[in-house]
Image (spheres, rainbow, N blue to C red):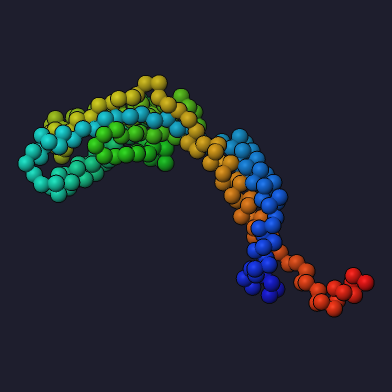
Amino acid sequence: MTWLLSPPSLDDLIRLLRAWRFWSVGALIGAAIGAAVFYIAPPSYRARATVLVDFNLEQAWPQETDRQQFFYLERETRKLEEIARSDAVMEMIAEVNGNITTRELRDGRLSLSQPAEGGWHFHVDDENPERAAALASAWAQMFVGQVNIQASTAEGLNSFIKANVTQAAQLPVERSVSISVYLFVGAIAFLAFGSILVLFSPHPSPLPEGEREKKVE
């Protein structure tokens, strides 16, 4: 039992490095297992719609300091993120796509990337690629509608903020996790497991010098 608790020795590390054939074959086996998992239980599809958000900073704060402008951008960005995930937007998406509920929408299907001035990407994950694209398109359009309404009626947003859908048709749809990730993770996991077996598996202790000479005779 002591061999299991003792740290690897220099001989163990050398033995680990010499097993290059095992690492080569193991990496291929792990990658093959990762590919098999990808095709047997593939990840969901992910669609992406894009909205251009313009804060019009020069017009909104023409003579303010950089610090004040920074706080303005941070504050308005948080407001926009709240609008994107608001009940009003979720309910309109569910109403347009009648085969889904607001609870399902909030259950990890929707995600935002790059929430700042410029392009906002609205990602939707779904098992059906067509529905993923439809939901992403609806989400982007409902968000833009709510932003422009609130900016024009002074309901908490600065009136200089403008949002426009730049991509809501023929959206790019691909797997949420690429097969290369499965290949890499499979190879690394197999090699890590193999390293543990090589380092911590019991192996015969070297014979004393006299015993080795007798064995040779």
User: Based on the displayed image, in which of its 4 quarters is residue 202 positioned?
Assistant: bottom right
User: Based on the displayed image, in which of its 4 quarters is residue 159 positioned?
Assistant: top left
Label tally: 0
Query: What residue is shown at x 34% (from left), y 24% (from top)?
Result: 168
Q: At which x and y percent is residue 132?
A: 43, 29
Residue at the extreme top: 170
Q: At which x and y percent is residue 2?
A: 68, 75
- Closer-to-camera residue (8/20): 20
- Closer-to-camera residue (116/204): 204
In which quadrant of the rendered image does the N terminus lie? bottom right
Q: Can residue 131 be seen here?
A: no
Quick check: 179 left or right of 121? right
User: Based on the displayed image, in which of its 4 quarters is residue 61 positioned?
Assistant: top left
Query: What residue is shown at x 42% (from left), y 30% (from top)?
Result: 47
Q: At which x and y percent is residue 56?
A: 16, 34
Query: What residue is shown at x 78% (from left), y 72% (from top)?
Result: 206
Compared with 86, 187 (above or below) is: below
In which quadrant of the rendered image does the C terminus lie? bottom right
Q: At which x and y percent is residue 131?
A: 44, 26
- Closer-to-camera residue (111/19): 19
Q: Can residue 42 be seen here?
A: yes
Compared with 116, 130 (above or below) is: above
Residue at the extreme bottom: 210
Residue at the extreme right: 217
